[in-house]
Amino acid sequence: MNKTLRALIFLVALLFLARFSSAQNKIVVFQSDFGLKDGAVSAMKGVAMGVSTELKLFDLTHEIPAYNIWEAAYRLEQTVRYWPAGTVFVSVVDPGVGTARKSVVLKTKSGHYIVTPDNGTLTLVAQSLGIDEVREIDEAVNRRKDSQKSYTFHGRDVYAFTGARLAAGIISFEQVGPVLPKQVIRISYQQAVMEGKIIKGDIPVLDAQYGNVWTNIPDILFKQFKPKFGDMVHVVIFNKNKEVYKGDMPYSQTFGEVAEGKPLAYLNSLLQLSFALNMGDFAKTYQVASGGEWSVEVSLK
Amino acid sequence: MNKTLRALIFLVALLFLARFSSAQNKIVVFQSDFGLKDGAVSAMKGVAMGVSTELKLFDLTHEIPAYNIWEAAYRLEQTVRYWPAGTVFVSVVDPGVGTARKSVVLKTKSGHYIVTPDNGTLTLVAQSLGIDEVREIDEAVNRRKDSQKSYTFHGRDVYAFTGARLAAGIISFEQVGPVLPKQVIRISYQQAVMEGKIIKGDIPVLDAQYGNVWTNIPDILFKQFKPKFGDMVHVVIFNKNKEVYKGDMPYSQTFGEVAEGKPLAYLNSLLQLSFALNMGDFAKTYQVASGGEWSVEVSLK
Amino acid sequence: MNKTLRALIFLVALLFLARFSSAQNKIVVFQSDFGLKDGAVSAMKGVAMGVSTELKLFDLTHEIPAYNIWEAAYRLEQTVRYWPAGTVFVSVVDPGVGTARKSVVLKTKSGHYIVTPDNGTLTLVAQSLGIDEVREIDEAVNRRKDSQKSYTFHGRDVYAFTGARLAAGIISFEQVGPVLPKQVIRISYQQAVMEGKIIKGDIPVLDAQYGNVWTNIPDILFKQFKPKFGDMVHVVIFNKNKEVYKGDMPYSQTFGEVAEGKPLAYLNSLLQLSFALNMGDFAKTYQVASGGEWSVEVSLK
């Protein structure tokens, strides 16, 4: 009787563990600044398929502007959380290839794995999803065979190879290499803050396909204004402290609430305050770009 | 004996149904105007993989020009029929996001499913493949958990989520939501017609990669001319009734039948009359574009 | 006893064959000049999924410049070897569609299959990976049903269809069609050679995303200079024998070894001599392009 109960408890515990473990799930998602015009992305996927044909391979994007670590960090922040726990991301934006930057795998508290050079790419996900553990890739063992002569394609020979072996369960997370302190290289950027009756923030990225301007001001900060749909938002946009745009626009639930070509403020799919022209291109119209030099001030009229 | 026979008939009927049913086949094909530069497409796929890792995910295109519903309709028309019955398409070109347009799933008579805002995107496939049934997505149940706060990314939280659950067989077509009348929102466009000895038509789309001009004139209409390969076709192209191009070109079976840089008329892969320059770009050379304002008149010399 | 031994030897031989045979592995990799803006690539994949839903479909690139057979050849050369043996490649860059060029499948000595028009696309892989056998596609049987009326989309109706059936094991390599002589159409190009103290070569392709210039000079030729990292390489670049660039740059193991904006010579991921500007765009800065008309002369100072 007692035995049966213990067996039952053990079984439940096992199921519980299985449910909440972040075991790898055979999914690999690739990101890079390689573009899709040459064979680099395909070579990475070929190496992964050579590791295990059971893997499922996907792309985040390969159109990160060349060497733009900030945007690599932002795309991971925008995407990782929507994939199931256990997914392995391989991100290769690596201006310092061959220099002293470490090759690492971050396991987030959400159970996602990110294989990348530790060069700032992990800035945002480390903060939002939390660091469970960071390990340095031991390239002596985690490197494609016969690739020692090649100096420049770590993406294929180390990152894709290691990510594929981790995702396929051929190596455990521990076998990636030695554990590092729970920290990653971080890019500094202006955080969103309330100062008096004004919220200050920056423009980490544009929604380039539509020309919408996304800020890093989260809904919880903006909602301290207690805004109602239709309330007018006063927006000033600066480039290196020089005013580039000043205007008023309604806080809107849908783009269709303003006439075509008119501006509106809304919460984007990441629940950050954003600006758009209905059926138009805000960024192009007002010559707004993104990055550390671009900041915004927002108030409610 | 009688019993055995009945069982046999029942079995055969079952097999027959299985063969011809349009049961979902775990394939999801995505289309959007999101582009591939940010994380939006990847977030949709992550949500789908979170629904079931057994799904097979593909892309139609994500380079639909922003808000261009007509082109979304055309790309579906060009592609859906080549996928096996049971395939689920998720098409997100949605200028009216958040407005009163309905979110629907069309089941075509060919057994394909298309998950989309009902905003004209279904114009062409509803006509060519036929409407078996249209259902409105019940967003109270068919919506990603914890996504209620987000107003603008229906593609991820409703369309990808519902398409993935339908493709995986987690919900049946009936569980999508209430059945609607057998009709969809249609974009009006000029149909191809024979008027006397002239065929009139429009230019729904360009074969942009090569600069070929595709009309909506089907082979069965053009063949009323009884054309032989080598016969000269007289072509006039108008933009809002203003003549843009006038010329003669041979009806050709292959591009190589005319000299480099010379024009030819041919039937494209959808068996529609089209115009090209051998090894050249007809559209760019003669400044021809596509859409409702572009029309053609064709006759045989 | 003797019998047992023979059985054992037979078993070992079988296992050996299984290990080294190039049986198809259900992987299909597509390449074309179709771009990703329309439905052409998706239609090819739909046809493949209609052949077998067990196939795994991938892309090499679809951004080959229109009709550029040389670049198609180069991308295959850059990529095929990184995929497991048994992978089927479908490459459709076909300026002569409908003309007398043959539709073939090449089986390389490395066990890869390439389905393509034989128009020069196989120039480089035939040379580097070796020709095991070439077969002409018998279009009477290896053609999508009901596709006889369509003249122009061989990519979908013949190449994707045949590649999918071969990869799925529905047809054997022998069933592709009749065997041809062990040769393919080759594009002529200047090979890399040492002449006195100068190595001459050409620029087959640019690493366009970064603007790096790749030559066809392999490491084994360059290393006859016995270069050490830091040694200065003297580089002259010609377009049709007209000098376009002349300069000295260090042979470097990593980009970071020179200051930002400064040139370096390095071995790329294919172990060919290449030129770059650290954090810059060599090709754009010095107006260098690629192709048969571009040549280089390299010497060690």
Image (spheres, coloured by chain):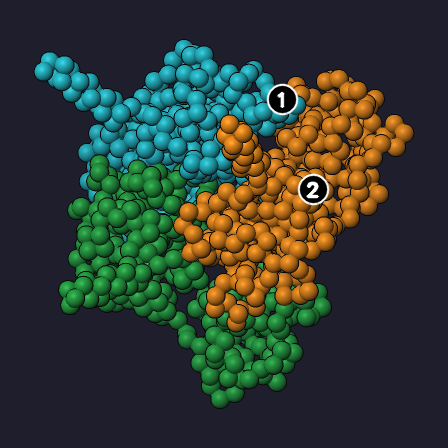
Chain colours: A orange, B cyan, C green
Q: What residue sits 37% from the left and 34% below the top?
A: B79
Left or right of C116? Residue C281 is right
**What residue type is disc 1 on?**
Gln
Indicate the chain on which mark 2 is placed. Answer: A
Q: Which mark is residue A130?
A: 2
Q: Outermost residue toward the front? A: A1
From the image, which quarter does the N terminus of chain B lie in?
top left
Residue B182's spot in the image, x, y percent? 38, 13
Residue occupying image coordinates x 21% and y 29%: B224
Q: What is the secondary structure assignment of the residue under circle 1?
A: loop
C206 vs A5: above or below: below
- Is residue B275 at all visible to an observer of this figure? no
Asked whether A58 or B12 is in front, the reply is B12
Rate crowding at label 2 as few (under 14), some (14 to 19) or many (20 or more) other CA atoms within 10 Å: some
The residue that label 1 is drawn on is: B148
Which residue occupies 50% across, 84% down? C224
B245 or B276, nearer to the observer: B276
User: In this picture, is A169 found above or below B222?
Assistant: below
